[in-house]
Amino acid sequence: MIAFIPKPSSHNTVPYPDQVGTEQVEALFGAVRLSVLAAALLSVMLASAVHRLGYLDPLKGLCWVAYISSCAASHIALSWFYRRSKSTRGQWRFWANWFTAISLAEGFGWGWATIGLAAGANFEVECLPVIATLGLAAGSIPAFSPSLPAFLALFVPATLPYAIASFASDNEVQRITAPMAFLYIGVVGGLGLLSNRSLRQRIDLKIRTEELAINLRRQKDIAEEANLAKSSFLAAASHDLRQPIHALSLFVGALRQIPMPENAGRLLEQIDASTNAMDSLFSTLLDISRLDAGVMTVHRRPFAINPVLERVCFGFAGEAAAKNLTLTYVPCSAIVDSDPTLIERIARNLVANAVRYTDSGRIVVGCRRREGSIAMQVWDTGRGIPHDKQERVFLEYYQLGKSERDREKGLGLGLAIVRRLTDLLDCKLALWSRPGSGSCFEVSIACAKSGVIPVETPDDELVSTPTTGLVVVVDDEQAIRAGMSSLLTGWGHEVVAVGSVDEAIRLLSSYTVRPDLIICDFRLRDGENGMEAIDLLRAEYNEDIPAMLITGDMAVGRLLDAKTRGVVLLYKPVPNGKLRAAITNLIATRIAGPLPQ
């Protein structure tokens, strides 16, 4: 079992209260410059107005303006240092305390102005500093309320002196305004508290949202890493996992050439059927892993869709007939542009699904022409799929109507592979179905622009004349060498089966003829690989001996040059019929002449 331990996140290195405090200080310094500059300008205008009315000594007014301006300058300087500090997150209390101290000094300056700036003047003139200060106090809410201590340090000293002094005033009108002043202090102070609470709630929501997003991303990353690790493991380990199946297939093929009693023959048929079923299920599992791991490549080219549908329907004709189903296809002359191998795999999975889940009636495979594309469709008269389950049928290991998987109906991966392959090929996948009436699966494939199929010589074009020769088998697995030797000897070949290229060269030195074919595994011991072994054997004879590379490694990116170097690439487990056809073709090519360069 592989355990995935999440890396510590840099977002969570600061305790939650520090995160809130840091956000508050950031908001505090965000609007302070404009606020304190406006306060300094207001002090100049207020002092000038009272002086013009003849109730303020110039020196007294100048000192007060200088005091308020120095407080504003201190705020601006503190903001400047804060912006250039590299460790603001861990020192938010330091900056908040200094901001509060300056605010307290400024609050005392404005509080003194309400009772001392226009002292001795009539009530109307005395109201000028009061109105200016109360307006400043109310206006400080947006700039100072992010930090409640800073807001109270400015607001209380600025407003409370006038309210207290009004009670002791000889002016009856002023005494009447005292309760109003206290009411003002309570209302505006309450607004400041609400503003601070609202900001804290927004900060709390922001932090929790970020933490939730981080946790979701972390869980998503863990899940993706686990899924990718699983898929990468299966894709990388497929070579080792395919070895015993390949060896078993070779031994079954060798046994078929030995005369045996009828009951033993039936037993061999059952073994062969079980081997083929295991191969099919295992290949399906590895296909889904290769798709998830992103190692399956796409080779697009123009090709005719009709031969693909014909091969697929012919391949399932026997299975459909065994269930008394009518399987037909409608010929189509369209030329499409996609990967023919992957399109055929999609078609096979869709037809296999239709045959598997149709109990009676018919299955029709065909194409409809659309603008710029053709729609490959598979219709059946099967059980149908309820609307609420139509998305689930494309999930891994899901079988409709089965609480447990039915092994006779596969792993429930066929449609999951179809979904991944259509995504890989950028083909649109659609499904129409109604319970009891059947289903229709549709795959849209782009039409080829030229409508002409390039002329190619198939790699598996068979030579009808049986040929035999000296075959060198290089594989580090003893079971594979034994199975291959038995099988090829039964086909009439002379076999040299070895575990390394050095051993092959040593044994071949006693032969007077050159090998007719090299069959080599890709992964060999001691860091060797099959392509290097083939090159060494060819160099030994100074001739391009026909060669076949057999591998269970699905990381095909490293094997793309095999074809360009005249090497046939087959994937384990290789069916005996396909192996014999490839061997016959390659040896016949050697007899006919050297390989083309």
Image (cartoon, rainbow, N blue to C red):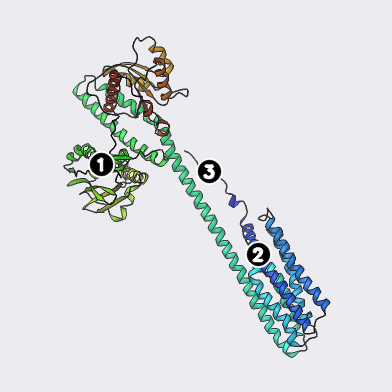
The disc placed on residue 305 is 1
Q: Which mark is residue 502?
A: none
Q: Quadrant of residue 300?
A: top left
| Kind of residue at badge 3 | Ile
Within the image, what quadrant is residue 193 found in?
A: bottom right
Asked if the residue under mark 1 is in contact with the one under mark 3, i.e. CB atoms within 8 Å, the reply is no
Residue at the disc numbered 3: 5
Query: Which disc number belongs to residue 28?
Result: 2
Q: In this view, does 459 lie above or below 132?
A: above
Q: State whether residue 232 appears in this view.
A: yes
Q: How crowded is mark 3: few (under 14 residues within 10 Å), some or many (20 or more)?
A: few
Mark 3 or mark 1, earlier in chain: 3
Q: Is residue 549 above or below residue 447?
A: above
Q: What residue type is labelled 1?
A: Ile
Real-space Cα distance between discs 3 and 1? Answer: 48 Å
Of 16 and 456, the residue lying toward us: 456
Position in image of residue 558 (x %, y %): 43, 31
Which residue is at a point 69% across and 78% down the rendered structure image? 134
Query: Of the residues under marks 1 and 2, which one precedes in the sequence?
Result: 2
Q: Which of marks 1 and 2 is in front?
A: 1
Residue 101 appears in the figure: no
